[in-house]
């Protein structure tokens, strides 16, 4: 089990299972949503993501079937979910309080990455979505 929280501690959650694929996403929407060069997130089965405190403080911004959920008190992004993938959420890895054995497996949407940011690790880079399978 993993635990996480927002910056102010109002929202607290548990992941009662394992993380799936995780990526550093460089798309423009993720940059805007995080205010940084990329978002770091990993898939989790929706039923294994449990809010244990602060559910009332969680607000959502939604567009085109993507719902970005954040703490209304401090603004920390917590998860995102997609209408097209109702059984999964993407947990923002920066909100984890528990250690994570394996980080993201690669960089996605590097064709639209911030021009002022250089990738210097050896992880795979994908122009858009990673290959399926």
Image (cartoon, grey):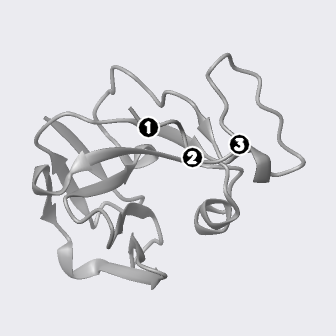
Local secondary structure at mark 3: loop
Q: Which residue is pictured at 29% across the width and 62% down the height?
A: 85
- Tell me the CA gap for discs 1 and 3: 14 Å
The answer to whether residue 82 is left or right of residue 88 is right
Q: Which residue is pictured at 28% across the width and 33% down the height?
A: 98
Q: Which residue is pictured at 59% across the width and 68% down the height?
A: 33
Picture coordinates of residue 17, whole percent (x, y): 13, 37
Q: Is residue 81 above or below residue 49?
A: below
Q: Is residue 67 above or below residue 130?
A: below
Around disc 3, counting alpha carbons within 10 Å, would you say few (fewer than 14), some (14 to 19), or many (20 or more)? some
Picture coordinates of residue 78, whole percent (x, y): 37, 61
The tag on residue 132 is 1
Mark with earlier residue (1, 3): 3
Around disc 2, counting alpha carbons within 10 Å, would you say few (fewer than 14), some (14 to 19), or many (20 or more)? few
The residue pinned by badge 3 equals 127
The answer to whether residue 11 is left or right of residue 74 is left
The tag on residue 129 is 2
Q: Tags 3 and 2 in contact by the CB under 8 Å rule? A: no
Where is the N terminus found, in terms of image quarters?
top left
């Amino acid at each position: 089990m993993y635990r996480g929280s927002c910056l102010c501690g109002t929202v607290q959650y548990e992941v009662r299972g394992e993380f799936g694929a995780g990526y550093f996403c460089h798309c423009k929407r993720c940059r805007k949503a995080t205010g940084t060069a990329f978002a770091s997130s990993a898939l989790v089965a929706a039923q294994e993501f449990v809010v244990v405190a602060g559910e009332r403080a969680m607000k959502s911004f939604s567009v085109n079937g993507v719902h970005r959920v954040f703490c209304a008190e401090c603004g920390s992004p917590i998860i995102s979910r997609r209408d097209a993938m109702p059984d999964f959420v993407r947990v923002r890895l920066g909100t984890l309080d528990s250690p994570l054995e394996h980080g993201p497996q690669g960089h996605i949407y590097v064709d639209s990455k911030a021009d002022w940011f250089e990738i210097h690790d050896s992880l795979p880079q994908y122009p858009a979505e990673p290959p399926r399978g």
